Image (cartoon, coloured by chain):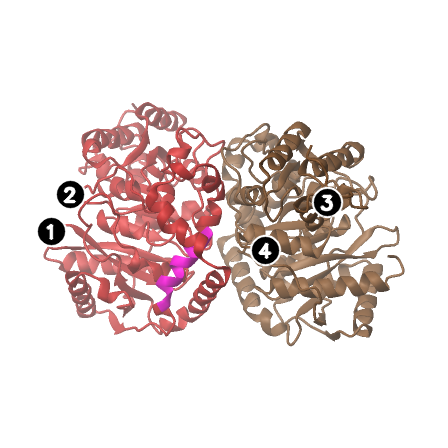
Chain colours: A red, B brown
């Protein structure tokens, strides 16, 4: 291990953010290997309960970290351990897509996001658990705050691994609510980018017209950093002092599905943000948006059922009954007319969205219906995310609430397409206000 | 081989369209094996000159055809030999993406389009030659009408194989003009679908916001049939008597780049179609469209350079100099601002397109600048396609012209997004008029 030239930061290494690790490694205060070992120790301690990892090879992790130390490499993610949802191809680790059909499958190449993360100096910790094909049939992962509850899905392991401090960064994906929900359930920041910004090459497609990567981290600054790395540009730090955002409080058509305590938490938050100086107005979505949740279902199912033609034709019996009788049956029964009608509605709503924001920078809405639900057989409702996913808008779930059982609940902030940086600045401000004012923090 | 119950059709089996094969096989007039053997014989005769195939295993082809005959299988493509561009994954044949990096690569699964073709009863003939990663560095294929000339690219083998009657159907892809151009150069119908209609799962991505599959065939009816198979719906035949289309003659900003004879052929065609009863008007594209060719270049380059991060980081020396100094250099030098500006322009033009059509059903434009160019080191200009690709519009190149050397030149018909069926009906009508009236036919 490299000699340390200054005192070790007071925070345990495995609790550092990515930015904190980069700073410490670059300043010579710690080494890539020390950080990797700290995260591995945390995993060794917690994994028997949490089960976030589909593939983890500690020796390979240490070897990667040592090589970075030896070469004196620099980079925007130098020494940062990261996890990849196991629907993301890696050339040196199995990639099983959460399905027995792909047991032991070894892709020829890294997905673009994997290669960009490594290029930036990141240390690939391993593959995080995904539901079957990023749909609903769950993997083994448990909620790190209560092992009797789901971590959410489909990016189950990515949410749990970050929320439980195994790694500071993980990549998931989202077709409905597969990043925002597990991040909310696991007390992390989760980011679904503007559709089309982050390349999905080498990621098993669920429904291409909706799929994006999703980033999970423990600070919004880390989300912004990782986004720049994955866009393939020089990272630009967020402003130290973000301006006061204009916020639209948006109940959305999903409001009646939320737990009453989630409704109250959101309403309280809106009041607190207004008291803290934000302009907060009510925003009602235009007619048509109430049909987006249903439209999303048909778009996703129609595309999914075609994308998995090979698996359906050749491995029907190895697909879970839940998937066969759910999304695949939906997709095979969906007519082209119904699919196109849904796609056209999505497109019309997408075009209406900027005006719907009015003068607001961001909308404040639910990230999940409430705390992680009990049990491991279901991954919870994606309904609060379906609208935003379908209109291709960027959003972040911000870990600012606690539910009646003391478990994390996120607030979702949503921005116009291509407004991801403005979204991040709003998240910075909102997080500071709500963390500072919340008696639970 | 199955006993034949009726006379063999007069046309040689390898010259039949897909619809003709399905009809003959279903009626018991021929067998899948007989068709496969006829196509293999044609290939054996022509391949030394044309070199359309990257992978071809005659025994495997015969085995597939025999299995279909033995099982008495039916299906919308029963017995139809088809080729797949070698950037499309196949579980039982190598898939090399036109790059030495992937020499001998064997994917775990079929691409969705491969599985859907087989499910429909098609016989996978083999993998057709692609340029390197569907970019510009050429493969070995020659133009079947003049081996000293390019077949076009990047779907070089798919264009040549269909144009030269090796198979009645082949799949290519298009990011700029990679299906329309080789189809035009090789005397076939080429179809670029409305963006997003045909799933690209298992197809090596070049630039996801532009990429589509492309279909190449020798009749528009075959294109329509194959489209339905790949959308995953019950095929619906085209109307026997298509109505007279309203046609917009659209020079586009690329007009000065066309060969003078191509300009004359298009102008003549517009006159002949008007004389045949079509309403033909001039259509000028709105301001902004003249910048789309440039925008397309930056969108494609920016995304390409990120998609191939793994190859760039790990196999730089095995990437052609042409690609390194072309699209990859462009992409790595392109700022996020320039990319987003291009993407936003594309989106604005996309929104303007329906109105730009006015009352027209389709626009008539160039498919290529002229005949296939001399030499095998360049694949010709994609400029006539860039606009339509970028606005996600469906188009078909119709093989109706001959250039000064007697080589094929296509006319491109373009429709509004989601108007693919109307496009096909217009192509039917236009093809009948121009084939019937053309002294060269």
Dot 3 falls on which chain? B
User: Which residues fall within the magenta stretch?
Assistant: A291-303
- Labels 3 and 4 in the same subunit: yes
Cβ atoms at labels 1 and 4 below 8 Å apart: no
Cβ atoms at labels 2 and 3 below 8 Å apart: no
**Residue B296: image x %, image y %?**
60, 56
**Residue A337: image x %, image y %?**
50, 63
Residue ID at (77%, 50%): B187
Spatial distance from mark 2 to mark 3, Cα to Cα?
60 Å
Spatial distance from mark 3 to mark 4, Cα to Cα?
21 Å
- Disc 3 or 4, which lies upstream in sequence? 3
- Give the labeled residue for mark 1: A405
Dot 1 falls on which chain? A
- Give the labeled residue for mark 2: A146
Cβ atoms at labels 1 and 2 below 8 Å apart: yes
Q: Nearer the viewer, mark 2 or mark 3?
A: 3
- Labels 1 and 4 in the same subunit: no
- Give the labeled residue for mark 4: B235
Residue A83 visible, this orientation: yes
Question: Looking at the picture, does residue A58 appear above or below residue B27?
Answer: above
- Give the labeled residue for mark 3: B162
Question: Looking at the picture, does residue A383 appear above or below residue B73?
Answer: below
- Disc 1 or 2, which lies upstream in sequence? 2
Question: Which is more toward the observer, B24 or B151?
Answer: B24
Q: Identify the element where label 3 is drawn.
A: helix
Q: Identify the element where label 4 is drawn.
A: loop
Q: Identify the element where label 2 is drawn.
A: loop
Confirm whether the magenta stretch covers residue A264.
Answer: no
């Amino acid at each position: 291990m490299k000699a340390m030239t200054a005192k070790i930061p007071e925070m345990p290494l495995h609790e550092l953010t990515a930015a904190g690790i980069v700073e410490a490694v670059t300043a010579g205060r710690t080494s890539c290997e020390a950080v990797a070992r700290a995260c591995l120790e945390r995993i060794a301690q917690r994994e028997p309960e949490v089960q976030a990892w589909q593939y983890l090879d500690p020796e390979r992790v240490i070897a990667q970290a040592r090589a970075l130390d030896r070469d004196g490499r620099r980079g925007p993610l130098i020494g940062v351990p990261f996890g990849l949802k196991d629907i993301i191809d890696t050339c040196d680790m199995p990639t099983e897509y959460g399905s027995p059909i792909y047991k032991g499958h070894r892709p020829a190449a890294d997905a673009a996001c994997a290669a960009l993360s490594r290029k930036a100096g990141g240390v690939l910790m391993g593959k995080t658990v995904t539901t079957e094909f990023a749909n609903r049939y769950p993997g083994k992962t448990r909620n790190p705050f209560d092992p009797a509850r789901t971590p959410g899905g489909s990016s189950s392991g990515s949410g749990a691994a970050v929320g439980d401090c195994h790694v500071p960064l993980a990549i998931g994906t989202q077709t409905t609510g597969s990043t925002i929900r597990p991040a909310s359930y696991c007390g992390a920041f989760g980011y679904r980018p503007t559709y089309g910004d982050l390349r999905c090459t080498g990621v098993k497609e669920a429904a291409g017209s909706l799929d994006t990567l999703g980033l999970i981290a423990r600070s919004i600054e880390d989300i912004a950093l990782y986004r720049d790395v994955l866009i393939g540009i020089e990272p630009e730090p967020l402003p130290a002092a973000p301006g006061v955002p204009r916020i639209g409080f948006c109940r959305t058509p999903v409001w009646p599905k939320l737990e009453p305590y989630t409704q109250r938490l959101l309403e309280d938050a809106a009041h607190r943000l207004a008291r803290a100086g934000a302009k907060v107005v009510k925003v009602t979505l235009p007619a048509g948006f109430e049909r987006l949740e249903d439209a999303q279902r048909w778009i996703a199912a129609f595309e999914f059922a075609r994308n998995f033609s090979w698996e359906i034709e050749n491995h029907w019996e190895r697909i879970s009954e839940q998937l066969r009788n759910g999304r695949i049956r939906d997709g095979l029964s969906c007519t082209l007319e119904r699919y196109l009608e849904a796609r056209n509605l999505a497109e019309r709503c997408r075009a209406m969205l900027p005006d719907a924001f009015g003068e607001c920078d961001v909308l404040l809405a639910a990230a999940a219906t409430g705390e992680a639900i009990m049990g491991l057989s279901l991954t919870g409702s994606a309904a609060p995310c379906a609208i935003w996913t379908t209109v291709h808008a960027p959003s972040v779930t911000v870990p600012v609430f606690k539910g009646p059982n003391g478990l994390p609940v996120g607030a979702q902030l949503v921005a116009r397409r291509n407004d991801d940086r403005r979204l991040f600045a709003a998240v910075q401000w909102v997080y500071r206000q709500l963390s500072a004012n919340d008696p639970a923090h």
